[in-house]
Amino acid sequence: MKKYGLAIVGSIVVLLSACNNSKISDNEKKGIKEVVSLYGGKVKYSKEDSAAVKKNVFEIDLSKSRFADRYTDNPELPASGVAYAFYKKLGDDKQKYTHIKCKLLLSDGEKVDYEYPVNELELVSSKMKIAVKITDLIKQRNFNAIKPMLDDSSYAQYNKDEFIKNLEETDLQYAKVNELIIVGYRFYKIYGKDILHISGQLMRGAQANAFSIDIDPNDVQERAVMINYTI
């Protein structure tokens, strides 16, 4: 089992500063705090309003984050995670913005920025309960209860009994899961279908294993198309 960055975030020195418009609400402070607790590093934030294009943006700049630096080959993953972590804490302030923007400065010198519409983040938030429910069942080691939550559509063909058996046998070799940490998300298409991919880590004390779940965002039955579970 590998140790992951989230297990060491607490030892990182965190710096906060405002680029402009430094006055932020209590909910926005909670969002920034959530980003810091997950990613560490140096965080700057600013607000950007454009009446001409009816766009209100909250921007978060993250640098010197050991966790984000683990994803230099796929920086959009932690960038989306930063945006989601901030957004989920906004409460009533969600209505103030049209987009959440994340800029990353990685240790290799690469600078990347991504912008996420709040309606997309709200969709991700609404589907996150599926990942949470499956995680809770893994915590309880109630693996049979996961099977009805697996989508049996034509683009998700695999032996679900064998999958559940392998999941149970693998999980029982390690310490119990105590928390799901979201790394990030992305959308992709398969057979013309939109799929939401949520990537995370299942925390087991000081250790973790990679965990991801693919969801049809248009499925109202709260099922997973696929679960990827790696020790």
Image (tube, rainbow, N blue to C red):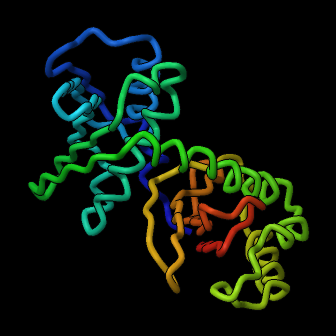
**Please, is residue 12 above or below residue 149 in the view?**
above
Quarter of the image where one finds residue 87: top left
Give the camera-side residue of 97 and 84.
Answer: 97
Q: Please indicate whether residue 40 sits to the left or right of residue 222 in the image.
A: left
**Please, is residue 130 above or below residue 46 in the view?**
below
**The N terminus lies in quadrant:** bottom right
Q: Please indicate whether residue 117 sits to the left or right of residue 114 in the image.
A: right
Q: Please indicate whether residue 4 sits to the left or right of residue 125 in the image.
A: left
**Residue extending furthest left?**
109
**Please, is residue 102 above or below residue 158 in the view?**
above
Quarter of the image where one finds residue 55: top left
Spot occupied by residue 19 in the image (x, y as percentages of width and height) = 14, 22
Q: Please indicate whether residue 127 sits to the left or right of residue 10 in the image.
A: right
> Which residue is painted at 40% across and 20% down in the image?
28
> Which residue is painted at 89% across and 62% down in the image?
142
Give the tally of numbered discs. 0
Spot occupied by residue 168 in the image (x, y as percentages of width and height) = 81, 74
> Which residue is painted at 80% across and 67% down in the image?
149
**The C terminus lies in quadrant:** bottom right
Give the camera-side residue of 14 and 48.
Answer: 48
> Which residue is painted at 28% across and 40% down in the image?
101
Quarter of the image where one finds residue 65: top left
Spot occupied by residue 103 in the image (x, y as percentages of width and height) = 21, 44
